[in-house]
């Protein structure tokens, strides 16, 4: 992914963090307040965001499985016959029957991506430092 596209992708989460940090609401009146956390968010976005986003994407994509490991061919059918409404997905335990085919919905993918972006902005220096510590020789 291009560096400019990565920065554009992280712009909305960065602005959301700045809005949460710099606009406290006191007695129903929102006002702009300078905070060192705002400086931290801007520096984290400017210097650490692309690398932390790339590291987090690798971690998320590495943990997903492309196919399910079921002990029997008809495990879902057996679960339905016994009255169960959930089946083993192979990832995070159980999911509703029919949703355990390994495909995430578009809204789930968007929400996961947005949470990763928010985390990459706020915890960018920590993620980059952990990546450097893990890959140093």
Image (tube, helix red, strand yellow):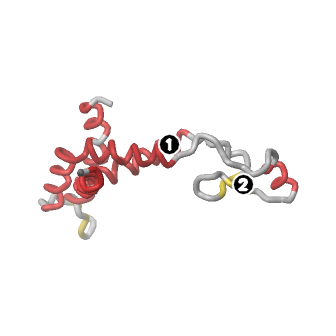
Residue that carries the numbered disc 1 in the rendered image: 109
Count residues near mark 1 (Cα–Cα under 10 Å), then give few for <14, some for 14-19, many for 20+. Answer: few
Marks 2 and 1, how far apart at CA: 20 Å
Q: Is residue 91 left or right of residue 117?
A: right
- Locate residue 12, reporting x and y percent: 30, 43
Along the polypeptide, which appears first: circle 2 or circle 1?
A: 2
Of badges 2 and 1, nearer the viewer stands 2
Q: Quadrant of residue 30?
A: bottom left
Q: Residue furthest front?
A: 137
Report the side of 132 relative to 63 (left or right): left
Which residue occupies 17% across, 44% down?
46
Residue at (25% x, 64% y) in the render: 25
**Which residue is painted at 83% across and 48% down in the image?**
77
Q: Position of residue 11 (x, y in %)?
A: 27, 41
Q: Nearer the viewer, residue 26 or 58?
A: 58
Q: Secondary structure at mark 1?
A: helix
List the residue tagged with mark 2. Answer: 87
Assign a secondary structure to mark 2: strand
Asked whether the residues under the numbered discs 2 and 1 touch, taking CB atoms below 8 Å apart as contact, a structural biologist would say: no
Q: Residue furthest bottom?
A: 27
């Amino acid at each position: 992914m291009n560096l400019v596209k990565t920065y554009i992708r992280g712009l909305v989460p960065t602005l959301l963090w700045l809005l949460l940090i710099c606009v406290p609401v006191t007695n129903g009146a929102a006002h702009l307040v300078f905070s060192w956390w705002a400086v931290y968010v801007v520096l984290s976005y400017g210097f650490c965001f692309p690398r932390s986003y790339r590291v987090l994407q690798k971690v998320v994509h590495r943990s997903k499985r492309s196919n399910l490991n079921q002990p029997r061919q008809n495990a879902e059918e057996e679960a339905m016959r016994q009255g169960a409404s959930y089946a083993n997905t192979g990832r995070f335990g159980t999911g509703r029957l029919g949703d355990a085919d390994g495909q995430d919905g578009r809204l789930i993918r968007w929400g996961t991506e947005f949470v990763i972006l928010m985390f990459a902005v706020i915890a960018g220096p920590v993620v980059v430092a952990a990546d450097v510590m893990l890959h140093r020789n």
